[in-house]
């Protein structure tokens, strides 16, 4: 990087008389317009300072905070031209440790970072009131966590790649509840769904729809048992409240 100007503003007042200054407060401008104002040592950024990017990919973006050996290291704030902002810990020039990233659209993430990526435990909130708190991996909701909606719905369980994936429980504000397997954000696999009126289904699901072997128990004690297709008893048996067979279905037709 070719230097255009180094302007020494002051020296540390604690240095002994005639001693060679170790840290200098400088203004340093590169030929592309990038600018650094702050502490300087051994011909590099060292200590607290402000770096503003000149012409190029990151033009106008700015970092204010701690430097070590010319790299962002310690606590600092990085601001983007689009309004995004990160405030937190840096190491090796990237967000590492705990920090808060705010998007211009209102989203806020507060938690752990590794090499600039959301990794570890954290909390992500949306401007609409949605909130996720739990594990992150590779920048996405991955691992165990809790997702809450402003209307009162809540999911507690496993995530993968930003989707509900694995075992979990989804509770609706109106009282319904599903506990079981999820895949790609939908009920997929084995699970139990209960309604506030007492109805209950235990069995298999495909993309959020009752499909496969299962048992549907109504609040009055009537039971449908067998193979379901698109939430319809396809091949199975209907029992009354006393356990007596009252009907059977074959390929969706009542026998």
Image (tube, rainbow, N blue to C red):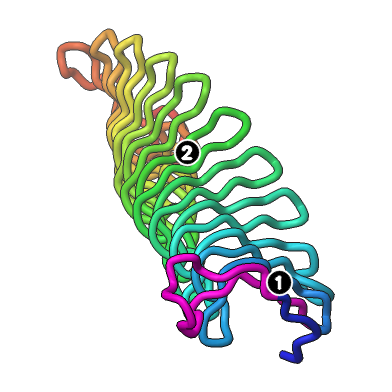
Front residue (pair 183, 215): 183
| Count of numbered circles in the view | 2
Which quadrant is home to the N terminus? Answer: bottom right
On the rendered structure, is 213 left or right of 41? left
Q: Where is 133 relative to 219, above or below?
A: below
Where does residue 45 sit, x and y in percent of width and height? 56, 76
Q: Residue 239 carries which label?
A: none
Which of 77/155 is in front? 77
Residue that label 1 marks = 27
Which stretch is magenta?
A: 8-30
Front-most of residues 198 and 67? 67
State left or right for residue 16 relative to residue 244: right
**Compared with residue 232, is residue 49 higher up or lower down, i.e. above or below?**
below
Picture quarter containing residue 15?
Answer: bottom left
Task: Tell whether label 1 touches label 2 (CB within 8 Å).
Answer: no
| Image position, residue 154 (x, y; %) | 41, 29
Quadrant of residue 223 in the image? top left
Q: Does the magenta stretch include residue 19?
A: yes
Q: Quadrant of the C terminus?
A: top left
Residue 137 % position (x, y): 41, 62
* Point 35% across, 9% down: residue: 197
Q: Which residue is drawn at 81% across and 76% down?
A: 56
Q: Which residue occupies 72% across, 48% down?
A: 83
Mark 2, Cα crowd under 10 Å, few <14 / some 14-19 / many 20+, is some
The residue at 53%/32% (across/down) is 130
Residue beneath label 2, please?
A: 209
| 130 shown above or below 186 | above
Query: Looking at this rendering, what residue extends furthest in the bottom direction?
Result: 2
The answer to whether 5 appears left or right of 105 in the picture is right
């Amino acid at each position: 990087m070719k230097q255009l100007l180094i302007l020494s503003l002051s020296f540390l007042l604690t240095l002994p008389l005639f001693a060679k200054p170790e840290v200098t407060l400088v203004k340093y401008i590169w030929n592309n317009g990038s600018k650094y104002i702050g502490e300087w040592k051994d011909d590099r950024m060292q200590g607290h300072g402000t770096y503003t990017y000149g012409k190029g990919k990151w033009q106008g973006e700015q970092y204010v905070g701690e430097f070590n050996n010319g790299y962002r290291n310690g606590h600092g704030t990085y601001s983007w031209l689009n309004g995004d902002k990160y405030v937190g810990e840096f190491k090796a020039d990237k967000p590492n440790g705990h920090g808060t990233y705010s998007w211009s659209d209102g989203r806020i993430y507060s938690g752990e970072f590794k090499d600039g990526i959301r990794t570890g435990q954290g909390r992500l909130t949306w401007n609409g009131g949605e909130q996720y708190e739990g594990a992150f991996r590779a920048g996405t909701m991955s691992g165990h966590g809790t997702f809450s909606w402003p209307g009162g719905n809540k999911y507690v369980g496993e995530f993968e790649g930003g989707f509900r994936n694995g075992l979990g429980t989804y509770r609706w504000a109106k009282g319904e509840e599903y506990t079981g397997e999820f895949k790609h954000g939908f009920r997929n696999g084995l699970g139990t769904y209960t309604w506030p009126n007492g109805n209950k289904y235990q069995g298999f699901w495909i993309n959020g729809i009752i499909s496969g072997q299962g048992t549907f128990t109504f609040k009055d004690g009537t039971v449908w048992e067998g193979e379901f297709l698109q939430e319809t008893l396809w091949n199975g048996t209907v029992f009354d409240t006393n356990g007596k067979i009252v009907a059977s279905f074959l390929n969706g037709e009542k026998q």
